[in-house]
């Protein structure tokens, strides 16, 4: 005879088990919801990041491009329809092309300022015509002291000199295939602004430093030079000091650089900076004082320029290397010392015929430049 003993059912244990399962289900559901929220946030961040990469063409970020920009980009640049831009710009191909809308021109100007080192620190003026002229005083206005009732004798009139920066037409000729233009997702305006700005910046950088002044700006290194001080030096000539060695720096490079700084008036030293190429900067970064400290100081905050003797260092690759007879280092307040005069509007002419199947975009702009105040720029020359 089998004897069966029934074990009493423990309801408390079952309830506990059900509670654990329920809590686990709730936790899994919460994790799923959390993951979904995280994925949504990541997708939004990616979308914002992609939008930030493309420059905003509208009048404000997030707005649609203006009708002028749409007509210029979709009508003229993509399809070559000139009727849409003739009424807006009032220009024609015979004038050298069509003036780009101000939004695209602002994109080009913004990238130019970021890429071109001298443009970042020089004085830039916009002109409506091809030329620019400015009168500057060379001796200042005379003055004197008199008593309260004493007569006022006539003072000498100031002397003036005319500044007329040599100008030239800067051009770039980027090309795109027809399939690129037919692709609606292709950011034509952003690509064109970047290509034009990159080529303009390369040509500008060379001209603002070494330009001859013939159909191009006159660079500050192409100006007359003299060892004479500001009081006796001819107007327009730039002062320099020697490095003390025919092939490089002498045994006291710190002293030479300090002398170069203090050849400049105190007022111009506020806002002054060093200009040199990367090869010269590599040499200067190794220079030490007599007690072993480096002259060069890295920027303490990200985005801030490195410093030499307390002044920021700007790298301009068109500056010469350290060699006998060259001027590898410039120190100056370029806002006061060098002027860039440019006609604000960039002209673009669409050319689908010269190099089929590519479409060229011939962009031009008139730019000039020269030394404005020679007392605001000083040079170091490699010589004994």
Image (cartoon, grey):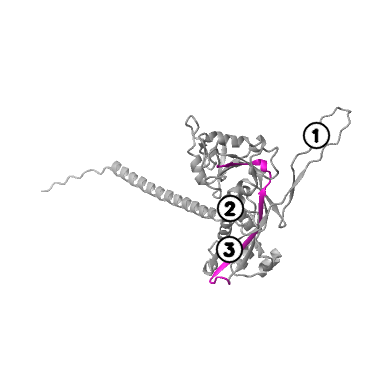
User: Badge 2 local density, few (<14 within 10 Å), some, or many (20+)?
Assistant: some
Mark 3, secondary structure of its residue: loop
Residue 64 screen position, x and y as percent: 61, 59
Residue labelled with disc 2? 206
**In magenta stretch: residue 363:** yes
Task: Examine the rendered structure and indicate whether residue 196 appears above or below residue 335.
Answer: below
Q: Is 19 on the left or on the right of 271, as rendered?
A: left
The residue range painted magenta reads 353-382
Residue 209 screen position, x and y as percent: 60, 49
Residue 74 screen position, x and y as percent: 60, 66
Spatial separation of the CA atoms under disc 3 and disc 1: 55 Å
Task: Examine the rendered structure and indicate whether residue 146 appears above or below residue 12.
Answer: above
Spatial separation of the CA atoms under disc 2 and disc 1: 43 Å
Which quadrant holds the C terminus? Answer: top right
Residue labelled with disc 1? 143
Magenta region, mostly helix, strand or loop?
strand
Q: Residue at x 70, y 44 (%)?
A: 235
- Tag 3 and tag 1, C-beta contact below 8 Å: no
Kindly give the residue lying farthest to the left in the view shown. Answer: 1
| 99 vs 339, nearest the viewer | 339
| 243 vs 93, nearest the viewer | 243
Residue labelled with disc 3? 173
Among the two numbered marks 2 and 3 on one chain, the one whose residue lies closer to the N terminus: 3
Among the two numbered marks 2 and 1 on one chain, the one whose residue lies closer to the N terminus: 1
Which of the 4 image quarters holds residue 92? bottom right
Spatial separation of the CA atoms under disc 2 and disc 3: 18 Å
């Amino acid at each position: 005879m089998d004897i069966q003993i029934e074990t009493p059912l423990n309801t408390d244990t079952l309830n506990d088990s059900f509670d654990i399962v329920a809590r686990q289900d709730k936790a899994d559901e919460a994790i799923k919801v959390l993951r979904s929220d995280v994925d949504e946030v990541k997708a939004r961040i990616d979308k914002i990041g992609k939008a930030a990469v493309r420059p905003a063409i509208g009048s404000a970020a997030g707005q649609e491009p203006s009708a002028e920009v749409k007509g210029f980009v979709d009508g003229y640049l993509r399809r070559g329809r000139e009727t849409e831009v003739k009424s807006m710009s009032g220009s024609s191909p015979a004038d050298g092309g069509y003036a780009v809308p101000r939004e695209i021109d602002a994109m080009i100007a913004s990238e130019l300022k970021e890429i071109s080192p001298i443009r970042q620190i020089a004085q830039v003026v916009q002109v409506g015509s091809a030329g620019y002229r400015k009168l500057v005083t060379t001796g200042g206005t005379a003055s004197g002291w008199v008593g309260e009732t004493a007569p006022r004798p006539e003072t000498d009139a100031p002397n003036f000199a005319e500044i007329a920066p040599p100008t030239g037409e800067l051009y770039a000729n980027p090309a795109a295939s027809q399939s690129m233009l037919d692709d609606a997702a292709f950011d034509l305006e952003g690509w064109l602004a970047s290509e034009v700005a990159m080529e303009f910046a390369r040509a500008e950088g060379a001209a603002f430093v070494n330009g001859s002044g013939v159909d191009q700006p006159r660079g500050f290194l192409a100006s007359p030079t003299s060892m004479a001080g500001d009081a006796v030096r001819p107007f327009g000539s730039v002062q320099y000091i020697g490095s003390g060695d025919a092939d490089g720096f002498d045994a006291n490079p710190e002293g030479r650089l300090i002398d170069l700084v203090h050849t400049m008036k105190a007022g111009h030293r506020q806002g002054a900076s060093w200009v040199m190429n990367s090869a010269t900067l590599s040499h200067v970064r190794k220079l030490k004082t007599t007690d072993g400290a480096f002259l060069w100081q890295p920027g303490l905050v990200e985005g801030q320029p490195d410093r030499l003797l307390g002044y920021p260092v700007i790298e301009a690759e068109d500056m010469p290397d350290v060699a006998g007879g060259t001027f590898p280092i410039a120190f100056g307040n370029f806002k006061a010392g060098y002027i860039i005069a440019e006609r604000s509007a960039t002209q673009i002419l669409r050319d689908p015929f010269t190099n089929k199947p590519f479409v060229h975009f011939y962009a031009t702009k008139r730019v000039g430049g020269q030394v404005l105040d020679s007392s605001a720029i000083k040079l170091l020359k490699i010589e004994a």
